[in-house]
Amino acid sequence: MKRDFHAPGRSAVYSNHGMAATSMPIATFAALEVLQKGGNALDAAIAAVSTLCVVEPQSTGIGGDCFCLYAPAGSGKVIALNGSGRAPAAATPEALRSRQVTSIVNTSAHAVTVPGAISAWAKLNATYGRKPLGELLQRAITCAEEGFAVTPRVAVDWADAAGKLRLNEASARRFLPGGETPRVGDRFTQPELGKTLRAIAEHGPRAFYEGEIAADMVATLRAAGGLHTEEDFHNGLTVAEFVEPISIDWRGMKVWQCPPNGSGLHVLMLLGILEGFETPEQGPMSAERYHRHIEAARLVYRDRDAFLADPAYMERSVAELTSKEYLGKLRGIIRDDQAMKTLPPAGTAEWVKHKDTVYLCVVDAEGNACSFINSLFESFGSGILAEKSGVMLQNRGFGFRLQEGHVNCIGPNKRPLHTIIPGMVTKDDQCIMPYGVMGGHFQPMGQTLVLSNMFEFGMDPQEAIDCPRLYPHPFGNVVELEAGIPASVVDRLQRLGHTVKLAPKPHGGGQAIFMDRKRGILIGGSDPRKDGLALGW
């Protein structure tokens, strides 16, 4: 597609050497800084994500989790790493009920799983990195100790989370200076976090999972009623693990995802359903295109809520849920002239009786490609701050239930359902694009919209990311639309039977770097819904 230079927006970024795309300029700079000093794509990704853990505190932090896909140049392989943490060993439904807990609240200590991010960074660095981990954390340490300027999207999200931050005295002291959230352009420092990052830089991940930093996190959680122990955190040191990635053949390429407990499976399901439709002649912003995507997503999110869990507890396999037979049956119940009023039971295609983040990507001059996502889950996670160490704790355990027999019922050392999903596309056994879309539960929908925009409708990465989005919210059966979707399309969707409303905020944020191997160039895009950018040289 040809860009209209009269319209607002920006061009994709082109380079023939290395490139990074993140949601904050200083994190993109941190990645390029590492590349130019001889680090590889994975080194650069760790430098960028650690910086984001400081300068985008509402979205991510070292008290969170991460997932990574890495494609070493010339290997023909995609490496997957699961860096999600586990529930405490004492976390049983009975233990919670004995404490009069009837449901897991997002600001409760029971929603906090042991953070996996630092374990993951260390494992990736030790296995594939070139630079010492301590060197990669230096930009993050500087931002924490000397401060950073609060950017516009961060300021908006921070203000929206003020109520949560006020629930925790330590969080209010640190993140509500003078009783208010910072304004755009204010300098914000986190000296306690800087000290913790210095300890990790000097002593490695053991400094986080053992000793005074771990003791501070455990004491904070126990004071809030949690079941966590120092042994749980000690065990978190080795929680990150390499896993076998999953993929689907799509339009002559392979799309790769991390396996469950992440929801990348549902990207593959969506692509498999939609590939069987002819490309709508009306184009990428047509009611026909959006309607099919909505209906397919409704079916996929239905299955997610029923089946996605720690893989040790899943009742349906990835192979079953991504089989051509099953996805073909789901496709067959989607009608172009009418939205489904109800959905069949999960796992079926017949009406019979029987639920915030940062994403970044980096490609280096050698062609190593990294797709990396790190998150606290909801804005500022649980809102519980371990004050001495400066660690904001995630609330990934909010994905657990107390429903006995459900695949996501909380249990000892169990991983919860995860929404964060890095993506990778390969062709002829070569990586051609690391990519990802942030936004909690929106991510499978967001990823497939961007992929379809590029490889079905011919957009470049920036155009594909810019394009207006919608989201069939899995909790409420309402389609949330961004403002850029034409009124005629909205009207048509309503007449097809969809209940639509304007999204309170734009959906997610994304990054992508397309590796044009024929021309030897990189083409990057970064989401205007966030504060970041893609840069290369």
Image: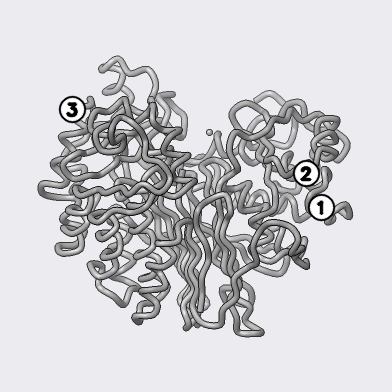
Residue 295, image x and y in percent? 74, 39
The answer to whether residue 446 is left or right of residue 173 is right
Say which of marks 3 and 1 sits in front: 3
Q: Label 2 crowding class (10 Å Cα cut-off): few <14, some 14-19, many 20+?
A: many
- For the residues labelled 3 and 1, say whether their Cβ atoms are less than 8 Å apart: no
Return the disc, 3 or 1, that comes first in the chain's sequence: 3
Q: Residue at horizontal 58%, vertical 61%?
A: 247
Residue kind at label 1, given as amino acid type: Phe
Q: Which residue is mark 2?
A: 292
Whether residue 299 is visible here, answered yes or no, is: no
Nearest the eye: 315 or 164: 164
Q: Which residue is mark 1?
A: 277
Say which of marks 2 and 1 sits in front: 2
- For the residues labelled 3 and 2, say whether their Cβ atoms are less than 8 Å apart: no
Whether residue 13 is visible here, answered yes or no, is: yes
Q: Residue at horizontal 19%, vertical 33%?
A: 220
